[in-house]
Image (cartoon, helix red, strand yellow):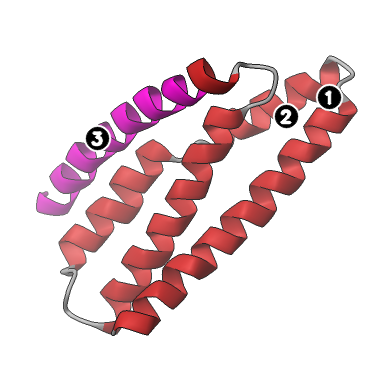
Amino acid sequence: MKIAATIALFCAGGGLTRYYLSGWIYNLLGRSFPYGTLLVNVIGAFLIGLVMEAGMRSTLIPDTLRIGLTVGFMGGLTTFSTFSYETFKLLEDGQLFFAFANIAASVAACLLFTWLGIVTIRAIS
């Protein structure tokens, strides 16, 4: 029960963070491209790299907190279902360049930032 409550609490925080952060990015850059979704997915990729590497390599992040952060916060923050829908809509609207740019940017940036999270922890531990 403690883990479920932790996940629920962190998920709410991740969802609110996604809402405000992606909204801020859309206000800055507009809605012609899914910038907000891309940003929260990249941040989530970086954070999961940090948290998992730190949690698995040391006792710095206890198991319950690691699960709360990864399943809860990152689960509420990252938006693969939104990414899929927005990409589909771009394809459906005939905006092939933006659809494939979104796919390439999302996959490349998230893999890069997951790696950066992992190497950051390895460098400091």
Q: Is residue 125 above or below residue 118?
A: below
**For residue 103, which quarter of the picture?**
top right
Mark 3 residue type: Gly
Q: Indicate the position of residue 111 as horizontal and vertical percent values.
A: 60, 61
Residue beneath the point at 17% across and 79% down: 59
Secondary structure category for the residue under label 2: helix
Q: Tell which residue pokes out farthest to the left in this image.
A: 2
Give the CA distance from mark 2 to mark 3.
Answer: 25 Å
- Residue 9 is inside the magenta segment: yes
Q: Which residue is mark 2?
A: 87
Q: Which residue is mark 1?
A: 91
**Magenta highlight: main SS:** helix
Question: 57 or 97, which is in the foreground?
Answer: 97
Residue beneath the point at 22% across and 42% down: 10
Question: 5 or 115, which is in the foreground?
Answer: 115
Segment colored magenta: 1-25
Mark 1 residue type: Leu
Give the CA distance from mark 2 to mark 1.
Answer: 6 Å
Asked if disc 2 and disc 1 are in contact, CB closer than 8 Å, the reply is yes
Mark 2 residue type: Thr
Q: Which residue is mark 3?
A: 13
Q: Is residue 80 above or below residue 16?
A: below
Q: Indicate the position of residue 15 as horizontal and vertical percent values.
A: 34, 30
Give the CA distance from mark 1 to mark 3.
Answer: 32 Å
Q: Residues within 10 Å of mark 2 (few under 14, many from 20)?
A: many
Q: Is residue 38 above or below residue 56?
A: above
Q: Indicate the position of residue 20 as horizontal and vertical percent values.
A: 35, 23
Q: Earlier in the sequence, mark 1 or mark 3?
A: 3
